[in-house]
Amino acid sequence: MSTYALGPFPSRASRPLDLMFGQYDGFVIVDLPDSRAAAASSLAVSSTGAFEHLETHELIEAEDVTPILEQAKGITSQLPDS
């Protein structure tokens, strides 16, 4: 799933628009099949110029957290100049 702004999407939205207090005026949660569909939808919506700011966030399902944590254990990194 991806958090998304308004537009005609090829999937169902949880609600047409959720309003909120804070930095942003609203948000829409939309189920999209993959990251490519999210990117295409983001480009289509932002190209209209109707929104000053648009963000996309992938939601993580609860059952995916443990495998993600396990995978993270095996990742090592080294900072530059260390």
Image (tube, helix red, strand yellow):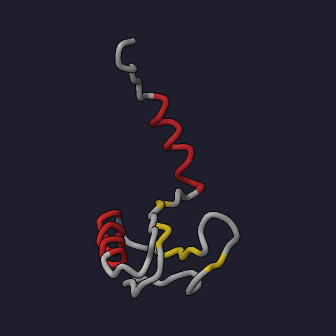
Q: Residue at x 55, y 58 (%)?
A: 61
Judge by depth and name the residue closer to the eye, 75 or 51: 51
Judge by depth and name the residue closer to the eye, 63 or 59: 59
Q: Relative to residue 63, is residue 51 drawn left or right?
A: left
Q: Residue at x 47, y 81 (%)?
A: 6
Judge by depth and name the residue closer to the eye, 72 or 13: 13
Q: In this picture, is 63 found above or below 73?
A: below
- Residue 58 placement (x, y as % from top left): 47, 60
Q: Quadrant of residue 15?
A: bottom right
- Residue 8 placement (x, y as % from top left): 40, 87
Most distant residue in the top direction: 82
Q: Quadrant of the C terminus?
A: top left
- Residue 72 placement (x, y as % from top left): 47, 34
Q: Residue at x 41, y 81 (%)?
A: 50
Q: How many marks?
A: 0
Q: Relative to residue 21, is residue 78 drawn left or right?
A: left
Q: Relative to residue 21, is residue 62 drawn left or right?
A: left
- Residue 53 placement (x, y as % from top left): 46, 68
Q: Residue at x 56, y 74 (%)?
A: 27
Q: In this picture, is 17 found above or below 34?
A: below
Q: In this picture, is 54 found above or below 19?
A: above
Q: In this picture, is 75 found above or below 27?
A: above
